[in-house]
Image (cartoon, helix red, strand yellow):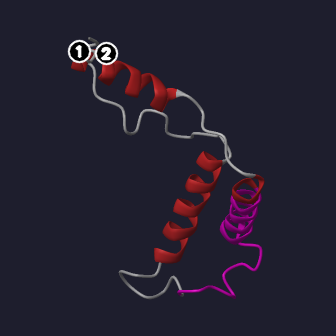
Amino acid sequence: MTTAPPPETKRLSAEANAALPRKSSWLVQTLAALGAILSLIYLANFDAGIWELIPDIIPGIGNIDEVLFTLLLVFCLRKLGIDLMPHLGQPRGK
């Protein structure tokens, strides 16, 4: 008769599994690369603010488009295997 491994073993294997890089399909990699390029172009501000999704002069919501494109960039880079913030999502040490 077999017994289930102790919960500590399951937790350790889940943590070890989460630390491994995940393989993505070529479509996910391509879309992530295109999203990163698009967000970099938007954030580079080549048009000097002439064309923007939300004009920066609007108080309170003027910079929401830059925030969204920055989040898109960080997400796409993580999908491509470049983690700019590796400490996020990990438990704090003592």
Q: Are marks 1 and 2 in contact (CB under 8 Å)?
A: yes
Looking at the rendering, in which quadrant would you find the C terminus? top left
The residue that disc 2 covers is 9
The residue that disc 1 covers is 6
Residue at image x 32%, y 22%?
Answer: 10
Q: Secondary structure at mark 2?
A: helix
Percent coordinates x, y for residue 51 in the rendering: 68, 88
Quarter of the rendering containing residue 34: bottom right
Instruction: Name which residue type carries label 2.
Output: Thr
Eyeballing the image, is 43 above or below 2? below
Instruction: Name which residue type carries label 1.
Output: Pro
Residue at image x 31%, y 24%?
Answer: 11
Quarter of the rendering containing residue 12: top left
The disc placed on residue 49 is none
Eyeballing the image, is 50 above or below 31? below
Percent coordinates x, y for residue 38 in the rendering: 72, 68
Residue at image x 66%, y 81%?
Answer: 49
Quarter of the rendering containing residue 82: top right
Task: Give the side of residue 79 with respect to residue 6, left or right.
Answer: right
Task: Give the side of residue 24 with respect to residue 60, left or right.
Answer: right
Q: Magenta residues, as a range?
A: 30-54
Most foreground residue, 50 or 34: 34
